[in-house]
Amino acid sequence: MTNTQRTLKFLRNEWHLKADVVERWIPGANIRKDLFGFIDIVAVGEWTFGIQSCSYSGISARVKKIKESKEMYEHLLLLDWRLYVIGWHKVKNRWVHRAVEIESDNKKPAPWKLP
């Protein structure tokens, strides 16, 4: 089972969300492309969640990657999305996760307006 599959199962069974994978495979280029450059899974419940799934050791690199996409992640936060990096590792033969919420760097974000 992949980290993405583990995360889907966790979101559906523990957080009781509707969730699906939004990253896609680009044939020929042999790469995976995340939604907006950093979202593997979108889940919906009371809010909309954008999730980056990874190994436990990759959490800080994924948080940094999202923070480098400042304009996009701040925009999603203004639209009331919740953004998380969920990392997985095995402890005593059992898969354990750590979920890190990405929060705004702005103290008082300006309201989003249509152009």
Image: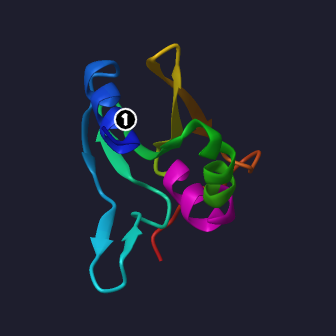
Image-quadrant location for residue 13: top left
Query: Which residue is painted at 33% across and 47% down in the image?
Result: 42
* 87 versus 23 height, above or below: above
Query: Which residue is painted at 34% across and 33% down in the image?
Result: 6
Q: Is residue 18 left or right of residue 86?
A: left
Q: In which quarter of the image is the N terminus?
A: top left
Q: From this viewpoint, is residue 103 visible?
A: no
Pick out the residue farthest to the front. Answer: 93
Q: Front-most of 29 and 47?
A: 29
Query: Which residue is painted at 28% across and 51% down in the image?
Result: 21
Q: Give the range drawn in magenta.
A: 67-78
Measured as percent of width and height from the top left, residue 70 is found at: 65, 63
Q: Front-most of 109 and 40?
A: 40
**Label 1: few (<14), some (14–19) or many (≥20) C-alpha neighbours in 10 Å:** many
Q: Is mark 1 on a helix, strand or loop?
A: helix
Q: Is residue 15 left or right of residue 75?
A: left
Q: Which SS does the magenta portion mostly show?
A: helix
Query: Which residue is painted at 60% across and 34% down in the image?
Result: 100
* 71 versus 55 height, above or below: below
* 47 versus 75 height, above or below: above
Measured as percent of width and height from the top left, residue 114 is found at: 45, 70
Measured as percent of width and height from the top left, residue 78 is found at: 54, 51
Q: Name the residue under label 1.
A: 7
- Total labels drawn: 1
Q: From this viewpoint, is residue 93 visible?
A: yes
* 24 versus 21 height, above or below: below
Q: Which amino acid does label 1 sit on?
A: Thr
Does the magenta segment cover residue 72?
yes
Q: Front-most of 61 and 67?
A: 61
